[in-house]
Image (cartoon, rainbow, N blue to C red):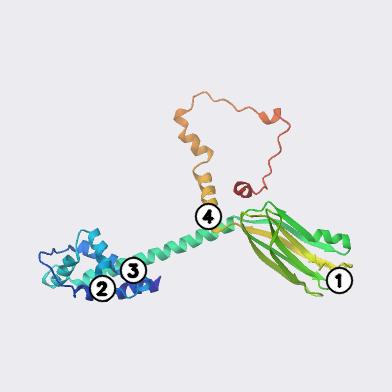
Amino acid sequence: MKSTFFRYIASAAVFTATLLGITSCSGPRVIPDKDLVNIFHDAYIANAYISENVKNDDSLYIYEPIFERYGYTMEDLQHTIMTFTERKSAMLSDLMYEVNKRISDEAKEEARKMVVLDTIDNIAKRAYTRTMYSDTLIRAKRLKDTTKLRITLGDIVPGEYTVSFSYLIDTLDENRNSRVEAYLVNGDTQQVLRHTMMLSRYREAKYSRKFTADTSHRELYVNMYYHPRNEESKMPDITIRDFKIVRVLPTEQSVDSLYFHQLGLRMLNHDLMMSFAADTLEKEVIEPQDTTAQRTDIEPRNEEKDSLALRTN
């Protein structure tokens, strides 16, 4: 942001010097200071953009839309600058200071807005980070125990999924070339973004892998103890700790969900809606019937369900 601001200021000399080189025409008008500040402000920003995005173009015609926006021409601007020293009520340096201060204030405000937006993004992503699966301890000391090391997370929604766990393969483990594999499964049951890694032996180590799922993906599969098909599976001895699959929704969706949630809490709550509707309600209050007692097929509400996953599906 600072570099952009300095480019704005540096462009002032180039812009002013070019203006003084224009051939004047008859009948130009003097531009009031307020409009002159606006014109210079817009022109400096345009000049900073041109210096980075337009090559070999030193013509002032690029600024004509700016002059026209305020109802003036290049000749009016040239005449105003040439006669500025004859005016005792103002100094060009004062005008330039006002322009530069305005640009500086805008740069600070843009920087503040970026900080605010970054903060909102971080809050939203933290608010909609979910542990989709976890297990603190898994041990496999028999062949049939290895089924506990294969995890499938179904009905996934778009987002980032991080698979992580700590593991220890003990000296009693009879296998070699033990690996971990993880991949996404799309709607055609095809494996995509498959990742494998050799597991360390006889010392505690960690595994972590991030997968980015989109609307085409349906499942996330993890096998914490994988062996090549051409190798015979032998007696295992592996301990898994703190296995987690953590989902983070895309930033835009997290921010949108955060706003939706805040609106629901602050604007659409029952007390507020009832206060808006107070004038239209009848004086007689009808007590709601207990329909739950009459029906036995209603499932109890599960507060732990991921409501966001339900909405995004």
**Secondary structure of the residue carrying numbered label 1:** loop
For disc 4, the marked residue is: 255
Name the quarter where the N terminus is drawn: bottom left
Q: Nearer the viewer, mark 2 or mark 3?
A: 2
Q: Are marks 3 and 1 in contact (CB under 8 Å)?
A: no
* Quadrant of the rendered image containing residue 153: bottom right
Q: Earlier in the sequence, mark 4 or mark 1?
A: 1
Q: Earlier in the sequence, mark 3 or mark 4?
A: 3
For disc 1, the marked residue is: 175
* Quadrant of the rendered image containing residue 100: bottom left
Q: Residue drawn 53% across and 44% down? A: 264
Query: Would you say 150 lies left or right of 130 here?
Result: right
The alpha-carbon separation of the residues under discs 4 and 1 comes to 47 Å
The alpha-carbon separation of the residues under discs 3 and 1 comes to 66 Å
Q: Earlier in the sequence, mark 3 or mark 1?
A: 3
- Inspect this view and state whether residue 90 appears: no
* Quadrant of the rendered image containing residue 216: bottom right
Q: Point out residue 27 in the picture as x, y percentages from the top left corner.
A: 10, 64
Q: Point out residue 204 in the picture as x, y percentages from the top left corner.
A: 77, 72
Q: Residues within 10 Å of mark 1 (few under 14, many from 20)?
A: some
Q: Amino acid at mark 3?
A: Ser
For disc 2, the marked residue is: 15
Decide: is 202 above or below 68.
Answer: below
Total marks shown come to 4
For disc 3, the marked residue is: 104
